[in-house]
Amino acid sequence: MSSSSSLIDLPREVIYLIFQYLNKEHIAYAFFGLNKYFTSAVKYFIGQELNLTKVHNEKIFQFCLSILLPSIGCNLQCLSIGYPYTLSTYIKYIQNYCSNLDILNIYCYSDIEDIRSYVTYLIHQQLMSFILMYNNKIIGEELSIRLINNYEDEEYRAIPLTSFLILNLSSMNDLILLKRFSESSYLSNGLYMIECLSTGEWFTDGKDDLCIMSKKLHRDSIFSIKQIDVDRCSREYELYNEGTQRRLTVLIPYEEGERWISSSILSTHRKESSHTCSSFTFEKIGNDNQFYIRPCYANARRLQVSGKRIIVSLCDNQNTLNHCFRLNYIS
């Protein structure tokens, strides 16, 4: 008579040798929950580190989220997530089941979400290290420190679980967005008059362009400033003049396939550029409601006063006084 045998009869050491040739997510999907023996073996083999960034099979991925993480999440100290799934896919599972993470490694290779939402949910004062990676190299170290030191919004620190956060960026444009995010300040929605500090005059919506005008025209110089991102992660605002019923747009420097004139102005109605913008960030520079107003474009710098017109500044070494505005809150 021939005797039958099964995997369960193999020594645990042999099982682990087999596991070494398989991905952890495949091991979990195939063996976890079969019986106590294999469930115990899978938990031990996965240990304290799990990488879900290479899971492309939807069934296996859902198994890892709904079955594996609730079972082993409290044991994990290092978790890698990201492409092809976004943070919103993982967030509730990390919150509920991964309470002892020391390292959260995120591959931000999806354009579905704004990169700033990752910072909104994950930055907290207890964070020991925040690392930005691009092409396997550390970038933006000063920016990382600034984001940790300046982030004060308790309401949006949804996952203060890790000591070490690593964001692997897919583009340097992500770094530019994070830089703007770190420099801008939250601004209460409401009606404002915008004063140019270099001249003491008001920022107003003229017939053709945005101009610097006398304070006597203050009734034409009131703008409603409204934060436009629902999740409050981008700190971007829309400027709207109720009198003219126009939202501000900005013309940007020449790009391939696009005409641009060097004296192009910040305009409320012109459409010379195919890239128009009605949102801006406000970068606070003082304690007296002093701000830089920056168009939300990677290649647009700050706003610059030129006579009675507002143009887009093309370089950083210009007189910064021309970029500075004071926002006077009306109501």
Image (spheres, rainbow, N blue to C red):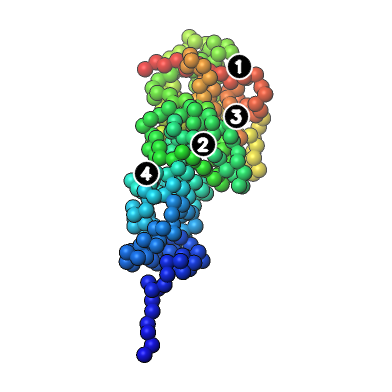
The residue labelled by disc 3 is: 301
- The residue lying at 44 percent from left, 47 percent from top is 77
Name which of mark 1 and mark 3 comes first in the sequence.
3
Instruction: Give the foreground label among 2 and 1.
Output: 2
Q: Which residue is mark 1?
A: 321
Q: CA distance from mark 1 to mark 4?
A: 48 Å
Along the polypeptide, which appears first: circle 3 or circle 2?
A: 2
Q: Nearer the viewer, mark 4 or mark 3?
A: 4
Residue at 60%, 41% in the rendered image:
138
Q: Which residue is mark 2?
A: 129
Which residue is the site of mark 4?
Answer: 99
Graded by Cα atoms within 10 Å as few (under 14), some (14 to 19) or many (20 or more), the crowding at tag 1 reads: some
Q: Nearer the viewer, mark 1 or mark 4?
A: 4
Distance of label 4 from label 3 (alpha carbons): 41 Å
- Point out residue 226 in the picture as x, y percentages from the top left corner: 41, 28
Give me the residue at 39% from left, 62% from top: 41
Gap between marks 3 and 2, in whole Å? 29 Å
The CA distance from mark 2 to mark 4 is 18 Å
CB contact under 8 Å: marks 2 and 4: no
At label 4, the amino acid type is: Ser
Whether label 2 touches label 1, CB < 8 Å: no
Tell me the amino acid under the disc marked 3.
Answer: Arg
Residue 283 placement (x, y as % from top left): 52, 24
Question: At label 2, which amino acid type do we have?
Answer: Ser
